[in-house]
Image (cartoon, rainbow, N blue to C red):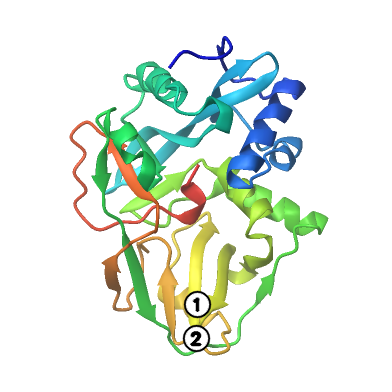
Amino acid sequence: MELKHKVELIKDYRDNETLRASFNSLAKETFGIDFEPWHQKGFWNDSYICYSFKVGDRIVANASANRMHLKWDNKSYSAIQIGTVMTTPDYRKQGLAYKLLETIVKEWESEVDFIYLFGNDNALELYKKFDMHEFNEHRFFAKLPDQKKSDIRKLDLNDVNDYKLMVEMTRKRVAQSDAIGIEEDSHLVMFYCHQWFADKLYYIESKHAILVMEEQNEMLHIYDVISEAVQEMEVILTMISVEKAEKVEFHFKPELCKLPIEQIPLVKEDQTLLIRHKGLEPKESFRFSEFSHA
């Protein structure tokens, strides 16, 4: 199909207020996400790069490349995660998303160990054109041990000291899993904390660890652990007060946990992990943490 207007490919324009505002507008319309507070607080850094088509000062299509540092099966990897793939309705079905993905893959495939994304089911055929293959994640559960008194407290990001603590710890965090662990991802952690998880942050001073968690439907969900040390999760669990929960779901595979772990395949509606890899063969079950999704 012939484009109704001439489009121009641009990238890495976060400091252009007009184009950033147009990008934000498209992100709100498509995903309900606002990137502006993240930018204003200084967390939109060089790791998140927009590749877009524009018409005049209007962003009409985008695919972003997010530079990632991972531990997988106890080995370190560099990667690009593609995300925020979107096209305004009047420019869809014109091949713009394909061209953006092609640009990112060509630019980065020789620079990183692999490229991956979490794709919508209705776009799987598009992603598979770039030699991307489906990988299966798992969910991890354990029975909660008896709780003891602890120094756990809820964080308030509106409090200057709590906010400072959160920023410092995300910058110094280490991966809590050898199966899949994300490092150097403070920009992503702070994005999620401001968007959806601000009321789910708890600090255990004696362990110098921040837990991102909530109790829901008689299940304790631990989304992430932010710490400078790998935490023994069976100890951490004794320090958490719950109302009715008897089990915990880890939204990552804990590296240190002496409790019996139950695992089942992860099935997420309209989301599939696809990886363009170079012989990557995971040796054990894994799950990317919630905060690592770009």
Residue for point 74% across, 51% down: 164
Query: In what element is the residue under mark 1?
Result: strand
Q: Nearer the viewer, residue 201 or 6?
A: 6
Q: Quadrant of the N terminus?
A: top left
Can residue 15 be seen here?
no
Residue for point 67% across, 39% down: 35
Left or right: residue 13 versus residue 103 is right
Residue for point 70% across, 55% down: 165
**Residue 61 position in % (x across, y down):** 55, 26
Q: Across the whole image, how many numbered discs are drawn on residues?
A: 2
Can residue 106 be seen here?
yes
Is the residue marked by circle 2 packed among few (<14), some (14-19), or many (20+) residues within 10 Å? some
| 244 to 202, vertically: above or below | below
**Residue 218 position in % (x across, y down):** 50, 84
Label 1 to label 2: alpha-carbon separation: 6 Å
Is the residue marked by circle 1 packed among few (<14), some (14-19), or many (20+) residues within 10 Å? many
| 127 to 245, vertically: above or below | above
**Residue 139 position in % (x across, y down):** 34, 66
Q: Quadrant of residue 100?
A: top left
| Residues under numbered marks 1 and 2 in contact, where contact means CB atoms less than 8 Å apart | yes
Disc sitting over residue 122 in the figure: none
Left or right: residue 34 versus residue 145 is right
| Amino acid under disc 1 | Leu
Q: Quadrant of residue 106?
A: top left
| Amino acid under disc 2 | Ala
**Residue 112 position in % (x across, y down):** 35, 26
Residue for point 55% across, 78% down: 215
N-terminal-most mark, 1 or 2: 1
Q: Nearer the viewer, residue 149 or 115?
A: 115
Query: In what element is the residue under mark 2?
Result: loop
Q: Which residue is mark 2?
A: 245
Q: Which residue is mark 1?
A: 220
